Amino acid sequence: MLFKYVHFLALLIVLTATAVLSKGSAIECGPAVGGARCGLNTCCSVAGFCGTTSAHCGTGCQPGYGSCVVPTAPSCDASKKSATNGRRVGYWQVQQVHDDACDVVLPADIDRAGMTHLLLAFAHFDLKTFDVIPANATDERYYAEFTALKSDSLQTWIAVGGGAFGGAKWSAMARNATSRTAFVSSLKDFMDKYSFQGVDLDWEFPDRSGSDAQNFVALAKEIKDTIRCGISTAVPSDWGSVKGFDIDGLSNYLDFFNFMGYDIHGWGIDEGSDRTKVTYGADIRDIAVELLPLWANATQAGQVNLGVPYYGRGYTLSNYSCTIKGCKASGPSKSGKCTPDPSGVMTLGDLATVIKE
């Protein structure tokens, strides 16, 4: 059996990982750097590093530069069975229609049971005119089929940006009022033309060393004031990236945040010795830690959606008798038939086929 040679890790909904700075990071808070406070109200340690652990907070915290309390996760009423009052959001990636060799999912194929929001990923925008445009010239043919799925209980939104689009283009667009207005005007026309009901601003990621955070808030406000539509954004799980967001400011204009609780570990994600060690790409324990900066910020839990990966990252084991977390791996698993690239990644359909075989 294939599982004798390749171990595929189970997928879990992810809550998040460590908010501790890597070794060698520059001092970022306290008197030594002009009185800078920590982002998201996290603790500033005696050494001048921001974080959420007991090493940063409590007796090791510099008062006045962030909270001095180790944050804890909020609780919710279990009887309601949902921290978000039933909101369930899914991304449909149009690029898989062009790339995947099999098991292509068209809009009509999407399992919409229980879904409240579907986001088409992704549209882009022109760097010179800031006009919102399809990421691929052939994407437009699927827009009408996608927005036709909307109902009284389901909204269809457009996601703009994405990881491959990059953050520098967002920075250039959002840095002044003129370019922001051009983008918002084009976004309104785009949404009206194709009947999208909301927008996901997938800026990956704002630069924490500049003015991106405040410009992002200004952009969100202008969209809310001009288009008056639903708005969300993708929020990264790693501490280094999430510091570029003004979550407090954005929460005034966004309906919800889509927390990227996936690809926390795995072949192609980890480096060094961790690269060849079996671990989980989406582990509830890692997610719980990675969410701590949001809780330190007193972010409303009801605004946060936890991302679930509908794919898996696998390993080729060094020792086929060792098949659990921590075992050594000699490389990535074989790719699936439907997703030949990148190596080590299988879609949900690929995994179902392997299990069946």
Image (tube, rainbow, N blue to C red):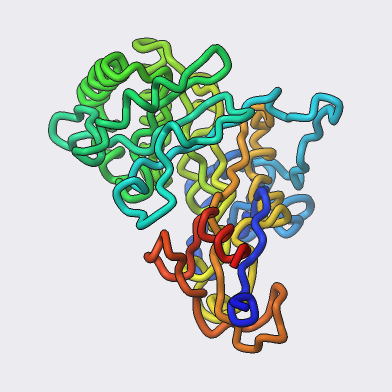
- The quarter in which the C terminus is drawn is bottom right
Which residue is rendered at x = 79% and y = 29% of the image?
81
Residue 239 position within the rendered picture, expressed as x and y whole percent measured from the top left: 56, 52
Residue at the left extreme of this rendering: 128
Residue 341 in percent (x, y) is at: 37, 65
Above or below residue 113? Residue 296 is below
Q: Is 341 placed left or right of 138 in the picture?
A: right
Q: Quadrant of residue 306?
A: top right
Q: Nearer the viewer, residue 328 or 105?
A: 105
Q: Residue at x 46, y 65 (%)?
A: 336
The one nearer the camera, 98 or 283, is 98
Q: Is residue 32 visible?
A: no
**Is residue 131 in view?**
yes
Q: Where is residue 346 shown, x and y percent of the image? A: 50, 61
Residue 4: x %, y % from top left:
64, 81
Q: Quadrant of residue 84?
A: top right
Looking at the figure, which quarter contains the N terminus? bottom right
| Left or right placement of residue 345 versus residue 302 in this view | left
Q: Is residue 318 left or right of residue 32?
A: right
293 lies above or below 182:
below
Residue at x 46%, y 43% (from the top left corner): 244
